[in-house]
Image (cartoon, rainbow, N blue to C red):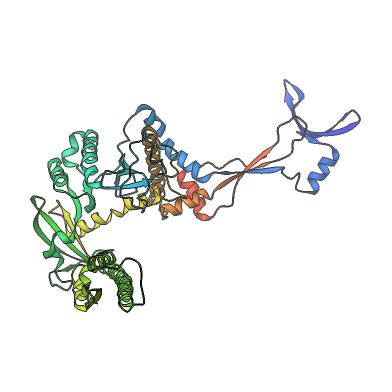
C-alpha cells in the first residue's frame, strides 16, 4: 500500500511517497521516495518538470555496429593470439589488386624505407607513397590477405611475392581439401608478365584476367560487326557480345574471350572525341604561332626548329589513339622556317570505331567455363576497386590520415585499416543477408546519423549526482531495421 507522507524538518514541509506492507507480522514501511517541497510538486504537476541543464550528443549507430562486428569476429582474441581468421568465408573466387596512398613524409627522412616515390594513382607523384596490395572475396567486400610494401615497387613485381604467400596461407587453411577447393584468382592486366603466369601455372591456380589488345592485333582488328560474335543473353550482360579462341600466350596455349560492350564503346568514343578536339585546338595554336612568326608578327625568343615542333606535336598527341587519328607534317618554308600541317582522317576514326573501341580481351584457365562465367568473374574486379575508393574517401575512408613515419608503425596502420575494412564488410553483408539493400556508403551514413543524446538535469540536492536521460535521435524506417538486424542495444530512456 502506498501513502503520501509529510515530514516537517526545520520548519519546512517535505513530502515522501512511502510503500507499506506486512513484514514479520507487522505493518512496516518497505520503501520511501522523496517527492520534494509543496512548490516542487505543484511545478511538476503544472509543467513538464525541470529543463535539462545541458545535453551530451554522442556518435552511437556506427560505433555500436562496428563494435558488435568486432565482438562477433573475435578481433581482439585473434590479434592477441596472432591467430588466422575464422574459416567461414566462401573462397570460390578471389580478387587481387594493388593501390598506393601518398604521404607527406619528408624527402630527407631516411628512417622510413617503405614510403618511396613512384607512379601515384592519384596524380601525386611529387610525394612519397606507400603501396598496398589486397586479396578479397568477390562477394561482400571481405578482405582476406594484404601487404604493405615500398611505394616504388610496381604491380608486376609485387604480384608474385604476395601471391606465393597468399597461396601458402590458403593451403594451410584448406588442408586436405586444397586440391578440390582452389579459388579462381581474378586480376587485371597490370600484373601480367611471363614470370607471373609461369608462377600461376606452377601453383596450378585457376584464373581470370585480361591482356592488352595491342599485344594481339589480329583480335583487335576483328570488326565489331563480325558474324562470329555471340550476344550474351544472361541478365545484366545484355549489351555484351563475345568471341572465343585459343592462342599461345606467355608460353602456353590459353583460352581468350574477346568481348564487346556497347556502354564501354560509347564511353571510350566520347573520350576519344574529347581528346581529339583538345589536340586539334592545340595544333591549331601551334600552326598559327608558326605562321605569325613567319609573317614577322612574333619576334624575339628562341626560334622554333623542325625538331622542336615535332616534339611539341608528339606531346600534344600523347593520348591513346591520337597518333593514329591525326597526321602531322613539319616542313620548312623558303626562309627555312618550320611550318606545320595536320589532318584528322575520317577513315582512321571509322576504323578505330569498328575495331579497338568497346573491346576487352579476357584470358582464363577455365576452358570449361562459358563466356558469361568468364565475363562475370572478371567484372567482379569492381569489388576491390570499390574497396580502394572507399579507403581513400576522406569522409568514410579507412586509411587517411596517416600520422606515422616509421616502417613498423606504417605496417601496424595497414593492419588496423584492413581490420576496419573487414568490420565494415561484415556489417554490409549482414544487412544484405537480411534483405536490406544499401550501398556501403549508404549503410555507413545511416549508422553514423544515429546519435545518442544524454540529457543532464539539475541535481535535486547539493552534492547529489545529476540525473541523466539517454535517448536516441529520431530514426527512419531503415535505421530502425538496422538496429534490429545488427542487434544494437537502445539506451535507457528513464531518468
Count of marks overlaid on the render: 0
Residue 93 makes an appearance in the image = no
Q: Is residue 468 left or right of residue 153?
A: right
Image location of residue 333, percent across then percent down: 22, 77
Image location of residue 87, percent across then percent down: 29, 37
Image location of residue 130, percent across then percent down: 35, 42
Q: Quadrant of residue 492?
A: top right
- In this view, the residue in front, 341 or 88, is 341
Q: Quadrant of the C terminus?
A: top right
- In this view, the residue in front, 399 or 236, is 399
Determine whether 435 is above or below 345 in the image. above
- Residue at x-position 22% and y-position 58%: 375
- In this view, the residue in front, 189 or 425, is 189
Q: Is residue 451 left or right of residue 293?
A: right
> Which residue ends up furthest to the right in the rendered image?
11
Q: Quadrant of residue 408?
A: top left
> Which residue ends up furthest to the top in the rendered image?
24
Determine whether 184 is above or below 289 in the image. above
Determine whether 47 is above or below 267 in the image. above
Amino acid at each position: 500500500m502506498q501513502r503520501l507522507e509529510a515530514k516537517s524538518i526545520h520548519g519546512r514541509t517535505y513530502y515522501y511517497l512511502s510503500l507499506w506492507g506486512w513484514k514479520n507480522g507487522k505493518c512496516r514501511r518497505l520503501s520511501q521516495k522523496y517527492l520534494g517541497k509543496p512548490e516542487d510538486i505543484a511545478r511538476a504537476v503544472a509543467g513538464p518538470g525541470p529543463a535539462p541543464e545541458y545535453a551530451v550528443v554522442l556518435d552511437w549507430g556506427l560505433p555500436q555496429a562496428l563494435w558488435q562486428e568486432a565482438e562477433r569476429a573475435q578481433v581482439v582474441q585473434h590479434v592477441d593470439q596472432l591467430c588466422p581468421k575464422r574459416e567461414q568465408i566462401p573462397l570460390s573466387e578471389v580478387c587481387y589488386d594493388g593501390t598506393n596512398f601518398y604521404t607527406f613524409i619528408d624527402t630527407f627522412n631516411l628512417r622510413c624505407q617503405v614510403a618511396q616515390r613512384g607512379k601515384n594513382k592519384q596524380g601525386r607523384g611529387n610525394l612519397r607513397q606507400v603501396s598496398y596490395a589486397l586479396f578479397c572475396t568477390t562477394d561482400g567486400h571481405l578482405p582476406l590477405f594484404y601487404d604493405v610494401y615500398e611505394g616504388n615497387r610496381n604491380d608486376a613485381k609485387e604480384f608474385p611475392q604476395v601471391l606465393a604467400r597468399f597461396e601458402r596461407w590458403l593451403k594451410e587453411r584448406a588442408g586436405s581439401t586444397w586440391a578440390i577447393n582452389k579459388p579462381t584468382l581474378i586480376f587485371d592486366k597490370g600484373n601480367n608478365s611471363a614470370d607471373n603466369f609461369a608462377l600461376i601455372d606452377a601453383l596450378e591456380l585457376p584464373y581470370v584476367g585480361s591482356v592488352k589488345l595491342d599485344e594481339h592485333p589480329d583480335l583487335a582488328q576483328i570488326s565489331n560487326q563480325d558474324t562470329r560474335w555471340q550476344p550474351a543473353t544472361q541478365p545484366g550482360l545484355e549489351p555484351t557480345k563475345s568471341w572465343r579462341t585459343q592462342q599461345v600466350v606467355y608460353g602456353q596455349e590459353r583460352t581468350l574471350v574477346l568481348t564487346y560492350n556497347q556502354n564501354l564503346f560509347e564511353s571510350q568514343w566520347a573520350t576519344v572525341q574529347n581528346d581529339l578536339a583538345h589536340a586539334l585546338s592545340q595544333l591549331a595554336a601551334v600552326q598559327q604561332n608558326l605562321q605569325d612568326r613567319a609573317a614577322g608578327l612574333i619576334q624575339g625568343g628562341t626560334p622554333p626548329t623542325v625538331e622542336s615542333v615535332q616534339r611539341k606535336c608528339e606531346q600534344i598527341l600523347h593520348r591513346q589513339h591520337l597518333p593514329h587519328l591525326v597526321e602531322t607534317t613539319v616542313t620548312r618554308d623558303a626562309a627555312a622556317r618550320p611550318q606545320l600541317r595536320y589532318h584528322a582522317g575520317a577513315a582512321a576514326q571509322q576504323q578505330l570505331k569498328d575495331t579497338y573501341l568497346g573491346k576487352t580481351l579476357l584470358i582464363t584457365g577455365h576452358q570449361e567455363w562459358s563466356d558469361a562465367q568468364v565475363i562475370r568473374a572478371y567484372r567482379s574486379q569492381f569489388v576491390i576497386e570499390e574497396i580502394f575508393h572507399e579507403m581513400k574517401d576522406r569522409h568514410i575512408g579507412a586509411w587517411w590520415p596517416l600520422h606515422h613515419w616509421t616502417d613498423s608503425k606504417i605496417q601496424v596502420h595497414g593492419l588496423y585499416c584492413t581490420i576496419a575494412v573487414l568490420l565494415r564488410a561484415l556489417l554490409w553483408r549482414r544487412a544484405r543477408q537480411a534483405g536490406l539493400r544499401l550501398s556501403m556508403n549508404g549503410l555507413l551514413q545511416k549508422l553514423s546519423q544515429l546519435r545518442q543524446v544524454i540529457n543532464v538535469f539539475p541535481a535535486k540536492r547539493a552534492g547529489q549526482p545529476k540525473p541523466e536521460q539517454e535517448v536516441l535521435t529520431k530514426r527512419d524506417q531503415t535505421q530502425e531495421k538496422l538496429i534490429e538486424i545488427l542487434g544494437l542495444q537502445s539506451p535507457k530512456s528513464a531518468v
